[in-house]
Image: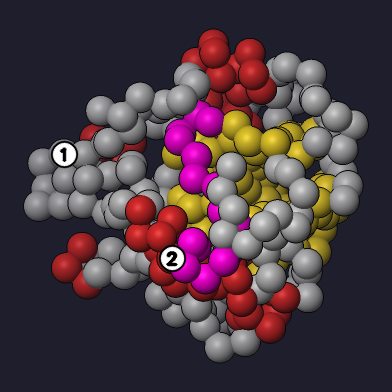
Amino acid sequence: MIAPFLKDDGFLAELDSPARAADELRLWWMGQSGFLLRYADKRLLLDPYLSDSLTRKYANTDKPHVRMTERVVAPECLQGRLHVVTSSHNHTDHLDPETLLPLLQADRPPRLVIPEANRSGVSERLKIPKVSMTGLDDGAIVELDGFEIYGVAAAHNEVTRDDQGRCQYLGYVVRCGPWTVYHSGDTLCYPGMVEKLRGFAIDVALLPINGDLPERRVAGNLNGQEAATLARDIGAGWVVPCHYEMFEFNTASPEDFRAHCERIGQPYRVLRAGEGWSVPSRFPQPGYSE
């Protein structure tokens, strides 16, 4: 099994360490699509999956979810350390009760941001009141604890809406201080996506690279080349890949992503699970990787 760059007490020590500069944006890859952002004294956790719930659920089926990477940290250890947590859609690796409930049961629970279309489903799965969540839709915005969060439609595999026209799959654009981060959630490209995102002047795009293979029998995502190309087309200063090295049946090597970034001159950073990164200048040399 792949060992995280940092885990447990080592990870928490770095998370709690002083910022290197007043305007530092530091992010950690938590595995799968999970990222933890820290700006000033605020922390936002995007789409965490920090349990083995799916491995147990599918253990005796024809689609086993064999874990590839050790967990970075138990969710209980993050209690009291977070201000906002998100779920981009209702698939368990993005809406996991075993991860979210320990966070929400803290004395000072974080605010939970979800697609408005999923409010009833999230309430039922987590057994929490509908009013305890903050819902967003494509084009909507909310400000929570110093983070401005915009909803952006995601296509997994299509842009799916409820009977009121609200998106059931979202990405989030997060603004904090001078920084803008785009977390796509699970998505493919769709018409109008690039034009919508270019207007945000995104510093860092966090994009899946596991691809869309029908034989996996799960909804698909961007592959490595598509993620690199999308980052370039939306004008992202940097791109960081995710949604790989969690389950053996649904992963991809980051090497194709890395190679395509080099070919098209898109700056990128490949992280190990549990590895932190302080985002540098938005305008590095083309194709640059730290």
258 is higher (above) or lower (below) than 211: above
Picture colour scheme:
secondary structure
Q: Work out whether 103 lies above or below 279.
A: above
Residue 206 shows in the view: no
Mark 2 / mark 1, whichever is N-terminal: 1
Residue named by callout 2: 260
The residue drawn where x is 59% and y is 53% is 288
User: In the image, residue 11 lies at what x, y percent?
Assistant: 56, 19
Q: Where does the C terminus fall, quadrant-wise? A: top right
What amino acid is labelled 1 in the image?
Ala
Give the image quarter of residue 59: top left
Q: Residue at x 33, y 42 (%)?
A: 246
Give the image location of residue 273, x and y in percent. Answer: 46, 34
Q: Nearer the viewer, residue 93 or 194?
A: 194
Magenta residues, as a range? 261-275
Asked if residue 81 lies in the magenta stretch, the reply is no
Q: Classify residue 93 as left or right of residue 67.
A: right
79 up-or-down from 143: above or below: above
Q: Which residue is mark 1?
A: 59
Q: Main secondary structure of the magenta part?
A: loop
Label 2: how many residues lie within 10 Å, few (<14), some (14-19) or many (20+)?
A: some
Label 1: how many Cα within 10 Å (few below 14, some 14–19, many 20+): few
Residue 104 appearing in the image: yes
> Could you tell me the amino acid type at mark 2?
His
Circle 1: element type: loop
